[in-house]
Amino acid sequence: MKIKIIPRTDETRAVDYAREIGMKFLDDGHTIWFEDGSCLNESFHSTPLDDADADIAVVIGGDGSVLHAVQSMKPQIPPLVGINFGRVGFLADLESDEAYAFISQLKPDTVETESRMRVQISVDDRIYTVH
């Protein structure tokens, strides 16, 4: 499976966990890569791929990290799995101790997605849409 890993880079625990889970996925034979500009890209020597090529994207952070990932990957957004390293966890609802087992059992052709609501904001007569 082709997995894009997107850690919250200003959170040391999230970056360390991204490195750990990335190694496990590599050992399992998966292709992995990290968000462009991530300090982890150099450690893994993985081939950067287009977002459209990912079977899933694993976001490691909080709900804000999930929203950032969705916004940065438009228009081709693969199914997202959020691992909660934040406070709330509405969008990033997997905990780190259960994430590897959950993601390992996923198969590209059988991933079920859950649609989430999108938000539109108006500021000073300008409309911003978050997809």
Image: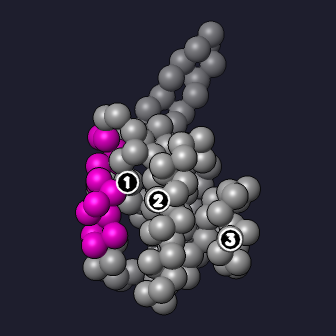
Secondary structure under badge 3? Answer: helix
Q: Is residue 82 magenta?
A: no
In the displayed structure, does residue 15 sit left or right of residue 100? Answer: right
Secondary structure under badge 2? Answer: helix
Label pair 2/1, CB-CB below 8 angstroms: yes
- x then y, percent, for residue 88: 31, 35
**Looking at this view, is 83 or 15 the one in front?**
15
- Badge 2 local density, few (<14 within 10 Å), some, or many (20+)? some
- Badge 3 local density, few (<14 within 10 Å), some, or many (20+)? few
Q: Which residue is mark 3?
A: 43
Residue 105, by quadrant, is bottom left
CA distance for labels 2 and 1? 10 Å
Mark 2 vs mark 1: in front: 2
- x then y, percent, for residue 69: 54, 50
In the displayed structure, does residue 119 sit left or right of residue 46? Answer: left
Q: Nearer the N terminus, badge 1 or badge 3?
A: 3
Q: Which residue is mark 2?
A: 17
Label pair 2/3, CB-CB below 8 angstroms: no
- x then y, percent, for residue 14: 49, 51
Q: Which residue is mark 1?
A: 83
> Which region shows up in magenta?
89-102
CA distance for labels 1 and 3? 21 Å
Amino acid at pointer 3: Ser
Give the tally of numbered discs: 3
Q: Is residue 100 magenta?
A: yes
Q: Residue at 54% across / 47% down in the picture?
A: 12
Q: Nearer the N terminus, badge 2 or badge 3?
A: 2
Secondary structure under badge 1? Answer: strand
CA distance for labels 2 and 3? 14 Å
Q: Residue furthest bottom?
A: 29
Amino acid at pointer 1: Ile
